[in-house]
């Protein structure tokens, strides 16, 4: 029996998860290649833009799993499936394979494509994109993601916020899904160009946006929201593979 | 009916919780005065050392609650009970009062004093102190804290780590309580003297200790541990009241 190949941009770790609900947790990242979105501030263009397609390797479940096991020394941990949009890849068999060995799976997606294997995840992070991304949210698709997840994985929202419009969008999304925990994340306005791994990040700018966001949330008495920066950006700047 | 007064060092917020399991969550802090420990690297000496006793105000539950309600605008959120060691204060009636209005309570303590009202908390953070603190852990007392909590609040361990000895201690504690989630936190070696609110923190030193700790944990394949810095120190340095 063969399964469809998965387009992989990079596999790295273990390092700690830098953002959202699993922040601080040792994780191996499987970043897939390809995305149905083109966000203006995308910080992983090397996994999104077709220009970098030749760097995406079609890999079998066996090949990917062998690399995850090597990196983790065969000790179960959380595998983060990210992208690009990992939902456009056939990841169901990979999740089943890892679960058989006690690994856990988190997936992060904008929620534009729903898959029945979402129900097999341990954590589903839905990260619909705010106005500053230049993308419009298809809420029917986002609803479908929740239908497919069927309440089985821990499901949370994560919204990147750059400005007041994004903040208003985040509040709208929270009102639409009042039962989902929501994480707000200040945007990184200095994402690296894909060919420049060492591009300097404007830490002070990110920090100022974080402080602004904390003030917004507490000033609004929006006490159900959680506000977290991208810890990996504070620790490692824009470097890849950490 | 009167209840015993609670010695309060400061009440502030809402701001986000900067560390541990509730990181990023909007919180009002009630810091009590007084501690049965004297850690070498204590970062809240103004709530610990008897020298600052005249700054601790004996407050009734009504007085404290009135201030928490004022700060939060009467909108329920998480109240963090910290110190000093808040477990040496009679906090049970305060917790009951807040619960009646839908507020949640987290308590952080070294676990040297067990109280029956621990079972009424929403979150119990047990933070036994590693060797670098100069304090010895009484594990019978720490066990008692779990007995008193009776499995009702979400209970987690948080260990501050400065060096290899502290790291080994953290592993020992994790082995003793395998069912408890554990958070490791790089120590801040530049805590402010209480009279200098604006003392500069050595961010680079804290960051380097964080990177070292991530390497230790991932190198050891200790994938159940979570590693988080004190976000408030990165955002605000050593300033108080944020």
Image: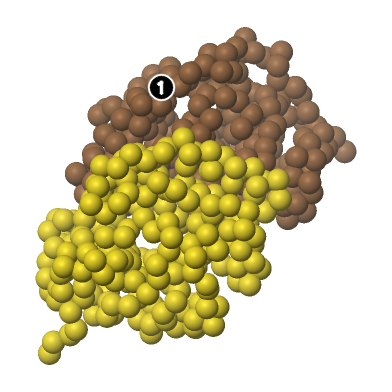
Chain colours: A brown, B yellow
Residue found farthest to the bottom: B1
- Residue A205 in view (yes/no): yes
Report the residue at 67% width, 54% height from top.
Answer: B222
Indicate left or right for A74 with A184 as reference: right
Q: Chain of mark 1?
A: A
Report the residue at 44% width, 76% height from top.
Answer: B112
What kind of element bears circle 1?
Answer: loop
Q: Which residue lies under the disc numbered 1?
A: A202
| Residue A45 picture location, percent across and down | 55, 18
Quarter of the image where one finds residue B234: top left
Seen from the viewer's position, the closer of residues A108 and A117 is A108
| Residue B125 picture location, percent across and down | 44, 66
Report the residue at 53% width, 38% height from top.
Answer: B208
Quarter of the image where one finds residue B37: bottom left
Q: Quadrant of the N terminus of chain B?
A: bottom left
Q: Is residue A128 above or below residue B223?
A: above
Number of numbered discs on residues: 1
| Residue B160 picture location, percent across and down | 50, 57
| Residue A231 picture location, percent across and down | 48, 37
Q: Is residue A234 above or below residue A94?
A: above
Q: Is residue B163 above or below residue B112?
A: above
């Amino acid at each position: 029996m063969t399964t469809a190949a998965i387009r992989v941009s990079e596999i790295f770790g273990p390092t700690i998860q830098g953002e959202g609900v699993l922040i601080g947790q040792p994780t191996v990242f499987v970043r897939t290649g390809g995305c149905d979105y083109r966000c203006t501030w995308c910080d992983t263009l090397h996994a999104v833009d077709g220009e970098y397609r030749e760097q995406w390797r079609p890999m079998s479940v066996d090949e990917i799993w062998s690399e995850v096991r090597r990196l983790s020394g065969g000790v179960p941990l959380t595998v983060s499936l990210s992208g690009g949009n990992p939902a456009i890849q056939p990841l169901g068999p990979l999740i089943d394979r890892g679960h058989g060995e006690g690994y856990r799976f988190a997936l992060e997606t904008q929620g534009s494509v729903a898959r029945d294997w979402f129900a097999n995840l341990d954590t589903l992070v839905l990260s619909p994109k705010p106005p500053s991304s230049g993308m419009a949210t298809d809420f029917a698709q986002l609803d479908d993601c929740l239908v497919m997840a069927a309440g089985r994985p821990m499901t949370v929202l994560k919204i990147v916020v750059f400005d007041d419009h994004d903040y208003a969008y985040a509040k709208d999304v929270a009102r639409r899904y009042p039962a989902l925990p929501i994480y707000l994340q200040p945007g990184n306005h200095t994402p690296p160009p894909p060919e420049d791994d060492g591009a300097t990040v404007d830490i002070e700018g990110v920090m100022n946006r974080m402080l602004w966001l904390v003030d917004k949330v507490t000033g609004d008495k929006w006490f159900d929201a959680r506000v977290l920066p991208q810890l990996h950006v504070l620790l490692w700047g824009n470097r890849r593979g950490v």
